[in-house]
Image (tube, grey):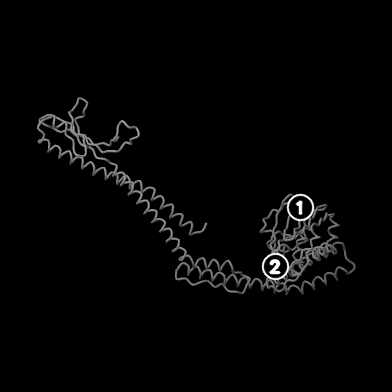
Amino acid sequence: MKLLDRTLRTYLLYSALVMLVSIPVFYVVIERLFTGEIDEVLWLRKEAIQASLSRFPDEKALLTWRDLEGNSRLQAVGPQTPLRNRVFDRAYREHPNDPRSEPEPFRELSAILTFQGKPYQLITRTSLVEQKDLLEALVLVLAGLLGLLLLGLLWLNRRTARQLWQPFYETLAQLQQYRIDEGRPLVLPASDITEFAELNQTISGLTRRSHQAFIDQKEFTENAAHEMQTPVAVFQTRLERLVQTQPLTNEQAELLGSLNGVTARLSRLNKSLLLLARIDNQSYADPEPVYLTDVLNGLIEQSIETVIAKQIELVRTGFEEGVLLQINRTLLDTLLSNLLTNAIRYTPTNGRIVISIQPQSVSIANTGEPLAITETQLFARFGKGEAQTGGVGLGLAIAKKIADTCGCSLTYQYANGQHHFVLWFG
């Protein structure tokens, strides 16, 4: 979830909560205010009626009296009549005998008045229909205004936030396009916001230091590999001459054989480091048309003796497709050679290797035990510790680097007792 959306969601939840609480509270408060005003009117009406009782000549005239609206009357006090004043809500039907007539709410006052020394009950009431309608209208207007205010605040907040965060998004876009192995410096937009300006300054300094460290490391690797190349070659040549010297004891021959293996591994390591340096420097020619089948058949032919010696079943599928790629031949040859060599090296005796060509990919699968490392470690330099298998720990790292350089994707998966390496073409 985006930061802006998370912020807006928080505002929205808070505003919705305020609306849900404020509207019922507003309704209750206004209703009580209306009720208080109506009660005050009823008590004033009671005082006015009490003051006007002297104009009635007798009890008969008093009991037949009604006000103009028919909402007030006087009646004799019965044995069940409570001798106290009270105000309460009550509902009346306009036509009591008609069940279809809806009851209307009233606020009613029951009070005791005195006429000629005798108590009489006053019943006076006021309709609440208009007050209810007015109250509902006020609540609807309030809800509409609050909703409009909420939508306006959300729109204004989103628009303002987008403008405020624009420098951050521009910085993020520049970082997503930045590559440390390119010589292009990272140019970040200027911002008058202090936090964003400090962020851009920190990122610029970090990328400069990282790029310089990358250049230094690349130059060191290339220089070290170049400097090691001649001494290693001389050492290997003289070691081979020493092996041919006679006579040699069994112990001497065993030591020289061990040294020869270590020297050969050191030579392969040196060549791999030089290859990585050349790939980093993009020191290879432009892409050319290459038939994938031709490259794989050539590599299989070079490795067939090892395959036969380990009694590996080699299965080829899709080789009749004749997939044509636009890629550097040397890099593709190195990539597929490393994958095939890795499969042959780690396939047990009497194992199985399946090479499958598809229009958009090529896969190399071999039987074997599952790995104890992650995919990230698998493609890392010196990530598997291959000293005991004759490798130098750079084969898959070089394959991954070449795939990225050529715009391809190299993936790994272990399923059904097989290691699957799939090279997807761009």
Depth check: give the residue in front, 85 or 178. 85
Q: How many marks?
A: 2
Q: Amino acid at mark 2?
A: Cys
The residues bearing labels 1 and 2 have C-alpha atoms spaced at a distance of 29 Å
> Which residue shows up at 71% across the image and 65% down it?
398
Provide the secondary structure element on which disc 2 rests.
Answer: loop
**Which of the labelled discs sits on residue 406, or is there none?**
2
| Quadrant (top left, top right, bottom left, bottom right) of the C terminus | bottom right
Provide the secondary structure element on which disc 1 rests.
Answer: loop
Depth check: give the residue in front, 224 or 74. 74
Percent position (x, y) of residue 160?
A: 44, 64
Q: Amino acid at mark 1?
A: Gly
Depth check: give the residue in front, 158 or 374. 158
Q: Which callout, 1 or 2, points at the residue further toward the start of the chain? A: 1
Percent position (x, y) of residue 157?
A: 43, 60
> Which residue shows up at 29% across the image and 38% down it?
105
